[in-house]
Amino acid sequence: ARRLAEYRRRLLPEGGTTPLSAPSSLSSAVYLPSLKFHKLVFGRDLGSGAFSTVRYCKHVQPDTTRSHWPEYAVKVISTLRMDELGYHASVNREISILRLLTHPGVARLVGSFRFREGAY
């Protein structure tokens, strides 16, 4: 986190701020600890890589219609694969970095949790 803060400080203009630096300071606006696994409805796979699959999902909100449920892309990492490759430290590092970032070109992390055979 220190290295990331130093890097961001060097990118800012002398004595100024950029439009991207303002949302970065609002970490609570990015992370949604109230998001629960059992309230997510998963859909199709959006893509996959060597370690994980990204799936489309919606957050169920009983008081609204389905068309108004928030939509998310969820990265699903198999815990068996993480154990096989010793990938736990890398996953934790990725989560830590994504919690700090707010940028239009990077997907925002709104929550992370483990459930059964996967890390989400």
Image (cartoon, helix red, strand yellow):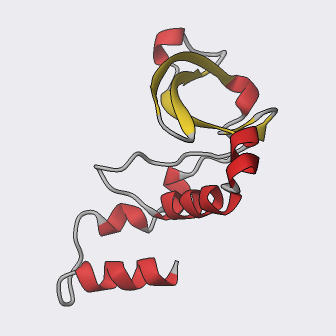
Q: Residue furthest bottom?
A: 14
Q: In this figure, what is the number of numbered marks?
A: 0
The reply, left or right, for residue 49 in relation to residue 93 is: left
Q: Residue at x 50, y 57 (%)?
A: 98
- Residue 93, x across and y down, in percent: 59, 64
The reply, left or right, for residue 22 in relation to residue 15 is: right
**Along the viewing direction, whichever of 21 and 104 lies nearer the viewer:** 104
The reply, left or right, for residue 75 in relation to residue 22 is: right
Q: Residue furthest left?
A: 13
**Along the viewing direction, whichever of 61 and 47 lies nearer the viewer:** 47
- Residue 16, x across and y down, in percent: 20, 82
Q: Where, by quadrant of the figure, is residue 61 drawn? A: top right
Q: Residue at x 35, y 81 (%)?
A: 7
Q: Residue at x 69, y 41 (%)?
A: 81
Q: Residue furthest right?
A: 116
The reply, left or right, for residue 83 in relation to residue 68 is: right
- Residue 60, x across and y down, in percent: 63, 20
Q: Is residue 58 above or below residue 11?
A: above
Q: Residue at x 17, y 83 (%)?
A: 13
**Along the viewing direction, whichever of 27 and 98 lies nearer the viewer:** 98
Q: Is residue 110 above or below residue 20?
A: above
**Quadrant of the image containing the C terminus:** top right
**Along the viewing direction, whichever of 8 and 81 lies nearer the viewer:** 81
Q: Is residue 1 above or below residue 38?
A: below
